[in-house]
Amino acid sequence: MPSSDPVQRFEDILENIARIEEFTAGMDLLTFSQNTQALYAVKHALLVISEAAKKLGDVGSELAPEIPWRKVQGLGNHLRHEYDRIDVARIWFVVEKELAPLKAAVERALKELDGGAA
């Protein structure tokens, strides 16, 4: 069911991206893969991002069409149902390559929802 408050959902996404940035600061794939606390925390933050994306409904696609929202939403299902087969390198790829464009798109969407205010 889509959320009645897309601003909150976009803010949830940004908050969890910031957490992931904090959890992984100064790490590379090797140090990340050896840090079970960081790995667990990042997986949880990605679950929240995925759920927030689901709750956005079509708003995500309307305000940030460049983001593959179905893929973002599907990540949570993968983390929940395939938890025993999670590829740490794939999680790291998401952290390294896919969160920055998502963050930028969400920030733009929030500005648009705020009437274009800076």
Image (cartoon, grey):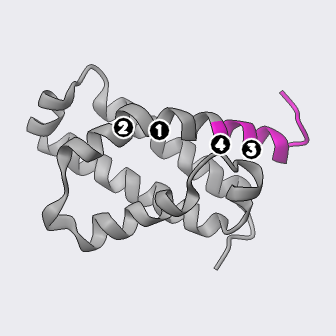
- The percent position of residue 83, horizontal first and vertical second, equals 20, 66
Residue 48 image-quadrant placement: bottom left
Residue that lies at the very extreme toward the top in this rendered image? 26
Give the amino acid at mark 1.
Leu
Quadrant where the image shows the N terminus: bottom right
Pointer 2 local density, CA inside 10 Å: few below 14, some 14–19, many at least 20: some
Q: To which residue does mark 3 refer?
A: 109
Q: To which residue does mark 4 refer?
A: 106
- For the residues labelled 3 and 2, say whether their Cβ atoms are less than 8 Å apart: no
Ranked by sequence position, the earlier of labels 4 and 1 is 1
Taking the spot 67% from the left edge, 74% from the top edge, the residue there is 2
Question: Does residue 94 belong to the magenta stretch?
Answer: no
Q: To which residue does mark 2 refer?
A: 95
Give the amino acid at mark 2.
Val
Taking the spot 74% from the left edge, 44% from the top edge, the residue there is 109
Residue 99, label in figure: 1
Q: Is residue 47 left or right of residue 114?
A: left
Give the amino acid at mark 3.
Ala
Residue 61 image-quadrant placement: bottom right
Taking the spot 88% from the left edge, 36% from the top edge, the residue there is 116
